[in-house]
Image (cartoon, rainbow, N blue to C red):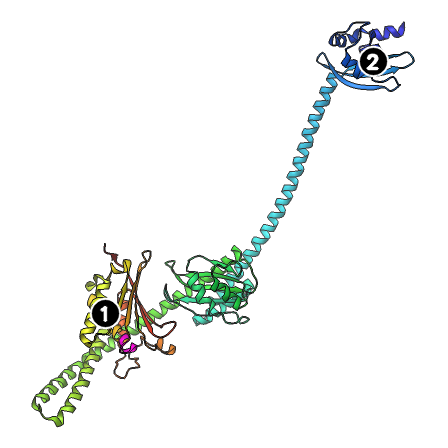
Amino acid sequence: MELKSFLEESPFPVMRVTSEGRLVYANEASRPILDQWECALHEVIPAGWRNSLLYSTDKTIKTMNAQCDGSMYEFAVVPVPDKKYYNIYASNITNEKLYQGALKQRAARHRNKAERQEELVVETRESLASEVVSRKQTERRLAHREHVLYAIHDISTSIGSSLHTIFDRITASIAENMQTTSVVIYETASDSHPTISQRQNSRAGPHLDVIPLACRLFSSQKPQQVTVSSASHEQLRECLRKHNARSLLNIPILDQNNARIGGICLLDRKERSFSSHEIQIVEIFAHYAGSEIIRKKLEKQLLQAQEMRLLGLMTCGVAHEVRNPLNAISAVMDALFLEMKGNKDYEIYLTHMRKHINRLASLMEDLLQLGRPLSKTKMQPVILKAIIVDAIVAWRKTTHTSRLVNLNAKGSAERLTIKADGVKLQDVFVNVLENAALHSGNKKPVTIYIKHAASRKNVYVYFVDAGRGIPEENLERIFEPFYTTRRSGTGLGMSIVRHITQSHDGAVRVYNNEPLPGLTVEFRFPVASLID
């Protein structure tokens, strides 16, 4: 009786079911479960619950969780085989499950937070490691640049260094800093014809055939690099292989107007990709090399200007002093011609004397023209092609020749104007045309090209002959006053050509054709406008 009273008063559901599933006992705490089962005392419990709970007749105790009437219960089924019934003990674990769920959620949150913090720690550690590596790389790069700047400072403070010496030291510094096989610095005298000034690392062989090719292919103002495997131009690829080079980096040298005046070319036996830092290092040297090229050119121009000024003062004085007695001699010669007219014994001597007097008079006129500055007021916009056509006509009239002269001007070159003294510029073209005809021979034509790109501010004029050219050692002296290889020449023609050209803010240079035969005189003039 005490046990039955204890079971009745127990807050936990207690039930007894026969092996057939008939409910033979249930305390008051079991009421919610029985309501859910819709089962009363001495009735059979629902089949689903019967199959789940009454599974065995052995002595194994089975536990299971199930939901009844919105609450979660834990059932413990204790079989009593001898009596052929089961004691079922239940416990409402709804709150316990809620607590367990909350604990699991909290544990999951803490676990996620811990994992996130661990990830943050790892990320922070990796970030710090990456930052340390980046800082070390930056420090190395800064130290590298500082070393380069010290090298440039050392080069720039050397007293009396020639441009070739400066180039030698620059290439040595680049080769040391870049660990490359060969370094070459080259200058381009104009946009169309590169002239090479090679300075390379002594450990490598000559690469003169690589650099002109690179000049033609790499005309951009930006750094460009190629390897044997990536080179799209077959000629460049074969040229690299020929010299056992697998990588090439070309850094342009620019002037103050961002025009390309040269470049630094690096060649390496390994196939490598030059980093942005390495390119920047070479660009520092290229910037310094460009400033040195410009400075040397300005020094040369200043020296030439001073020489021309002194020569002009001297020649003007000499010409004026000589012209007066020369005029008197000429007047006497005219009188002698009249007096001795018809006397063949003296006529040959008088003709010879007059020839040399005329030559002296021409020389004095050239000296005055060389020393006389051009008046800017006489410079007006003129069509360049028209001046060249007039020069060809004037030359043919003075030389009485029908020599073939080809004038090639296409597109905008036919319509552009320059600011010039038309008469003086025509004299320049006549002088150059006469020289070209003399060098070409009797039957060979002289070709004149006018070239202009719409995006450029300059126009180029080329006088191309078909002669034997000029020895390289004489090319640099061709503009020197009184320098000539012709017995009848005064040596002032090309000096006057350069003087007049520079007075028009232009430039002139002479070079042998590649390949020979022939010589080219190249003029550059600033464009004034285009005529529609």
The answer to whether residue 529 is above or below residue 24 is below
- Whether residue 375 is visible here, answered yes or no, is no
- Residue 52, position as x, y percentages in the image: 79, 17
Horizontal side of 163 relative to 525 (left or right) equals right
Q: Magenta region's main secondary structure?
A: helix
Residue drawn at x 9%, y 87% is 335
Q: Residue at point 13% right, 84% down?
A: 330
Determine crowd level at label 1: few under 14, some 14-19, many 20+ residues with C-alpha closer than 10 A: few
Query: Is residue 430 depicted above or below 227 in this figure?
Result: below
Quadrant of the snapshot with the C terminus: bottom left
* Amino acid on which disc 1 is placed: Pro
Residue farthest toward the bottom in the current orientation of the protein: 345
- Region in magenta: 436-443
Q: Secondary structure at mark 1?
A: loop
The image shows residue 88, relative to residue 519, as above or below, that is above
Observer-nearest residue: 58 or 433?
58
| Residue 227 placement (x, y as % from top left) | 52, 60
Marks 2 and 1 sit apart, C-alpha to C-alpha, by 128 Å
Q: Is residue 205 visible?
A: yes
**Residue underneath mark 2:** 88
Quarter of the view holding residue 214: bottom left
Q: Nearer the viewer, mark 2 or mark 1?
A: 2
Question: Marks 2 and 1: CB-CB under 8 Å?
Answer: no
x%, y% of residue 483? 30, 79
Q: Of marks 2 and 1, which one's residue comes earlier in the chain?
A: 2
Q: Is residue 310 magenta?
A: no
Residue bearing the label numbered 1: 373
State yes or no: residue 440 in magenta.
yes
Question: Quadrant where the N terminus lies?
Answer: top right
Label 2 secondary element: strand
Amino acid of disc 2: Ile
Q: 254 or 228: which is nearer to us?
A: 228
